[in-house]
Image (cartoon, grey):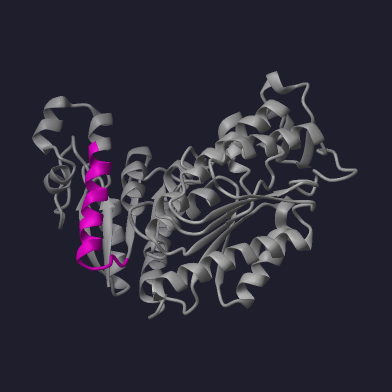
Amino acid sequence: MTVFLLATLDTKGPETQFLREHLRAHGCQVCLVDVGCLGKPTLTADISREEVFAAAGTTHQELLVTNDRGVAVAAAARGAAQIITNAQHRDPVQGVLALGGSAGTTIGTAAMRVLPVGTPKLMVSTLASGQVRPYVADKDILMLNSVVDLAGINRISRRVLANAAAAMAGMVQQQPANMTGDRPLVAATMFGVTTPCVERARTVLEDAGYEVLVFHATGNGGQAMESLIEEGVILGVLDLTTTELVDELVGGILSAGPARLTAAARRGIPQVISVGATDMVNFGPPDTIPTEYSERTFYHHNPTVTLMRTTVSENQRVGAEIARKVADAKGPAVILLPLRGVSSIDAEGQPFKDLLARQALFDAIKENTAGVPVVEMDQHINDELFAVTAAEHLLAMLQAEQLDKAD
C-alpha cells in the first residue's frame, strides 16, 4: 500500500519524517515527493524537486535564479499535479497525504484534485479551519486542522500528525475490493426548496433500475456533478435545480462557476433541465448582504442563509443563459417549465411569488432555446406530476440511447 507524501522538505523536514515513520509503522509504503524550492532539503526524497519542476515544464535552477516564491509555488503545484497524474496512469494511486501552510496546501491539494473521487486524500493544513473551497473544490479532500503551526514536533503537532498518518493508513488499507456498482448512474440536482420534486423523481428512476446521485446545489455540489459528468461515469442528468447559475450571474455566494450546465451538453448525454430555485440569490447573514440590495425582497432561511428574490431583469438573464447552454447540447435535452412556481417559497401565498419575474424567466428560455424542446406544465415544481414527468422524460431518453447502441 503506497502513499504519496508531499511536503516542502526545505521547511517541513522533521514533520515529514514523523509522518513517514508513522505511515510505515502502520504498514504503508511511502513515496516521498519534495515540492520545496528555494531552501535546502533536509530529507532525501523518492521524487526530487528537480523532477517535480521538470514535470511543470521548468527547472529548479531557473526558479532559483528567479527567486520568486509565488512563481515557485505555482510551478510546484503544476508539477506535483502532473507527477500524481502520471502515477495514476501507470497504476491507480492508493492515497495522497500532504502537509503545510498556505504554500504547502496550495501544492498538495492541486495534486489531490487530479485524482478521482474515492481515492484517499488528506491535507494537514494551518488553513483547514477557514474557507477551504479553493483547495477542496469538487473533490473528496479531507482537511485536517494542524491547530499549531507546522514548525517542529511538539505535544500538539505530534498528536495531530500521528492521527493524520493513522487516518491515511486506515483509508488506504480499508478500501473496498470492488467500488463499482451494478446499476447505471444518473445525476440530479436538489435544494431544500426543491426537495419534494427531486425525491419523488429519484424514486421513479430507482424503480427503473438506476442509481441516482443527488447533488446539493450549493456551488461545490454543482461543480462536483459537472466533474463526474466529465469523467464519463454519469449516463444522464436530471438537472432540476439550476439555482447556482443565478448566484454566478447576480453575485450570490453559491456559484458553481461559469462552466455550470455545460458538461452534459458537451458530452452529449441525456439531460432534463428545469428552473428550480432560480427565484433566489443566496447570501449569508443579513449583515453580509451588499448595501446596494437593501431595498430588495428577502427571506431569512436560517441565521446563516438569507435569500434574495430575483428581479424581472435578473430572470431574463438567467433564462437566456440556461437556454444558451442547453442549446449547445450534442445529445438529447428537454427543458421543463413549472408554470405555478419554481421553489417552495415561489408559490401561492409564499413570499417569493412574483408572476412577472417568473414569466420573464420562462419567456427568455423560450426565446433562446434554438430548437431544444420546452415543455410547459401547469404545475408547481414540487407537484408530484411534475416530478414524475421529469423522471419519465429522462427514462425515455436513456432507453432511446440504449436502443441506438444496440443497433
Q: Position of residue 57 (x, y in %)?
A: 15, 40
Q: Where is residue 134 in the image (x, y as percent from the top left)?
A: 45, 41
The one nearer the camera, 7 or 112, is 112
Please state, as top left, top right, bottom left or bottom right, where the N terminus lies in the image.
bottom left
Residue drawn at x 42%, y 76% is 180
Residue drawn at x 74%, y 50% is 193
Do we see residue 251 in this rendering?
no
Left or right: where 361 falls relative to 222: right
Is residue 160 depicted above or below 345 in this figure? below
Residue lying at the far top of the rendered structure: 292
In magenta stretch: residue 82: yes
Q: How many marks?
A: 0
Q: What stretch is highlighted in magenta?
A: 75-94
In magenta stretch: residue 32: no
Is residue 353 depicted above or below 43 in this figure? above
Do we see residue 22 in this rendering?
yes
The one nearer the camera, 90 or 53, is 90
Q: Position of residue 304 (x, y in %)?
A: 70, 41
Residue drawn at x 19%, y 42% is 56
Residue lying at the far right of the rendered structure: 349
Left or right: where 36 falls relative to 285: left
The quadrant where residue 228 appears: bottom left
The quadrant where residue 255 appears: top right
The quadrant where residue 238 appears: bottom right
Q: Is the magenta stretch mostly helix, strand or loop?
A: helix
Q: Where is residue 61 in the image (x, y as percent from the top left)?
A: 9, 34
Is residue 311 depicted above or below 195 in this figure? above
Is residue 403 depicted above or below 187 in this figure? below
Please state, as top left, top right, bottom left or bottom right, where the C terminus lies in the image.
bottom left
The one nearer the camera, 380 or 282, is 380
